[in-house]
Amino acid sequence: MKKLSHLKHFYQNSQLDKREIDLILCHVLEISTAQLMIYDKEITQDQKKQIDTFLKQRQAGKPYAYIVGRQAFWTLDLIVNKHTLIPRPETELIVELVLSMTDKEYKGKILDLGTGTGAIALSIASERKKAKITAIDFSQKCIQTALENREKYNISNVSIEQSNWFDRLSKENTFNFIVSNPPYIDEDDEHLKELSYEPLSALTAKKKGYSDIYKIIEHAKDYMEDNAWIILEHGYNQHKKIQSFLHDNCYKNIKTVKDLAEIPRITIAQWQNLAIIKQ
């Protein structure tokens, strides 16, 4: 019965949701949630100390993903750390869109801007093994994490490079898709305090959150094949301005896609090289 008494201690002395406590227990004990229900081994002092530490960190607001050092995304279980943004389920919509617009034999070129953990690039690559994918990030520490995730899953069709957006990319490199989950939160947004553990550079952008998105839209054209697609994640109230800016930059077939919560989440557009048409 020592096991049950330990569990009661964790549940009664924590302000956390029972599910979060269960996840922490399972992580430390290295068991599944189903196994937790019938777990009959005594919890060691080292395990109890680790559980107590993790519970205190979570109660202080540290995200579970940073506590355990990993986050599920698409079909992958990605390494994450304080240098990387935690991949969100809504970002999987970018992966879904690319997959819906291609097939398993797709051999095109895809650019993932601001790759972070490598979530988008590696998820697409795992499904489109013949595609050639380039993933870039400004942060060398993010690059290292993405490389670790690539090695973890032995994914060979993703090149991971350091660049501040397009700065180090040759204009000879053109792509069929350019995708990104860039920083898009206003620097003065009151909700940032809820994201205090995550790197601000991956969250916020100047000009009310639009500066990086606008820069991508403006410069992406120089790196896009004719009829290539750009796919951008953004905030819940940003789609109209982004659609307008895409239109002003001569993109076509512009539309916004809602996530599962019915929030405008992704805007896509197609680039048509007018110089080629005029020839």
Image: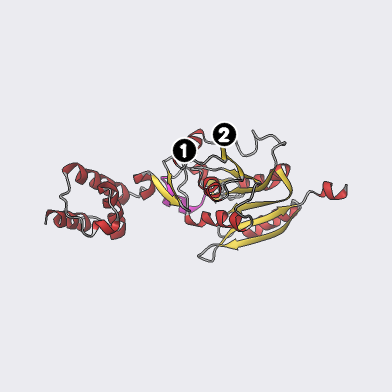
Of marks 2 and 1, the one in the foreground: 1
Residue situated furthest bottom in the rendering = 262
Residue 186 image point, x, y percent: 55, 50
Q: Residues within 10 Å of mark 1 (few under 14, many from 20)?
A: few
Residue situated furthest front in the rendering = 105
Towards the viewer: 49 or 128: 128
In primary-sequence order, the first of circles 2 and 1 is: 1
Q: Which residue is mark 2?
A: 162
Q: Residue drawn at (69%, 59%), measured in percent from left and top? A: 254
Residue situated furthest left in the rendering = 1
Residue type, mark 2 in image = Gln
* Secondary structure of the residue carrying numbered label 2: strand
- Residue 55 is left or right of residue 216, and the answer is left
Residue 151: give its label.
Answer: 1
- Residue 149 is left or right of residue 17, and the answer is right
Residue 226 image point, x, y percent: 75, 48
The answer to whether residue 84 of the structure is visible from this angle is yes
Instruction: Tell me the magenta residue range.
Output: 188-197
